[in-house]
Amino acid sequence: MTLKNIINNESGKTAFICGLGPSLSDSIEYITKNRNEIVLISCNDIDLNTNLNPDYWMFANSVQTFPFMLDRFKKYKDATIVHSDSVDATPKEWIEQNCSGLKYVGYDQRHFNNSKCNNCPNRCQNFINGRLTIQEELQNFTNYNLRYSPGDTVAIHMLALSILLGCKKIYISGVDLDYKKGYFNTHRTPMLVTEFDPFLNNILDDFHIINESAKNIGVEIINLSQSSHLSKVLKTETI
């Protein structure tokens, strides 16, 4: 499947974007209690850090994600795997051969104007002629005059996806944008604790553009992480 196959699949519903920052603890009880009433979109190691089963499990990694995670994906067959195959080094042929039993959506987040680039980790081997990027799909969907950048965190693409799905109210939890705080439900802190810092301004610009795009079609976005950098650009509340 492609992004076009799932546009408006969750029309009118409420979505929760769940990152893996420690502030997820502020809302995970609410999410668990109301799980059947929300569309849950998460990423990366959500299965290892929580008991939540995402409806949409999103990736935007430049490493070979799929060969290492296939067994984990198979445990969550109800989840739609949304995968940036344009940047992942996993060959498309491998994906086609091994993911036939999964709900799989590939997307592009870098080849604007359907033009190949010079810096793909996979040398543009997964480029699909005529495919719009997720940014271009969002711009068309919201009729906003700007599009966001290739993105420096998967959380940006999760938010774009929730709008494309047709969700009308979107909450963001656990997107702290600060690795120094570690992760939800673990004491592990990455070695590169300042990894977000050089990209923070660009990340916030992207969230601002997506938020303005959402407003253009009457979609409300609310950040639930009080101490997150997102409070600088998004409406922030508790739940």
Image: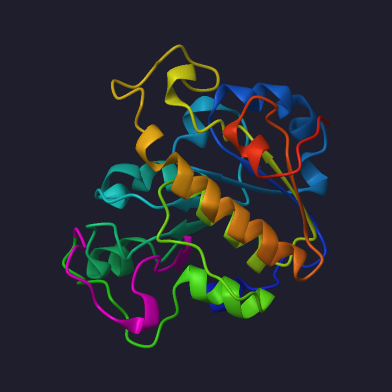
Query: Does residue 4 show up magenta in the picture?
Result: no
Residue appearing at x 58%, y 71% in the figure: 138
Q: Nearer the viewer, residue 39 or 108?
A: 108
237 is higher (above) or lower (below) than 2:
above
Q: Is residue 192 visible?
A: yes
Residue 72's spot in the image, x, y percent? Answer: 42, 41
224 is higher (above) or lower (below) than 125:
above
Residue 186's spot in the image, x, y percent? Answer: 48, 15
64 is higher (above) or lower (below) than 122:
above
Residue 145's spot in the image, x, y percent? Answer: 60, 76
- Quarter of the picture containing the C terminus is top right
Q: Nearer the viewer, residue 143 or 72?
A: 143
Residue appearing at x 57%, y 27% in the figure: 50
Q: Which residues are magenta?
A: 102-121
Quarter of the rendering containing residue 229: top right
Residue 27 horizontal side relative to residue 51, left or right = right
Q: Is residue 78 visible?
A: no
The residue lying furthest to the bottom in this view is 130
Residue 122 horizontal side relative to residue 130, left or right = left
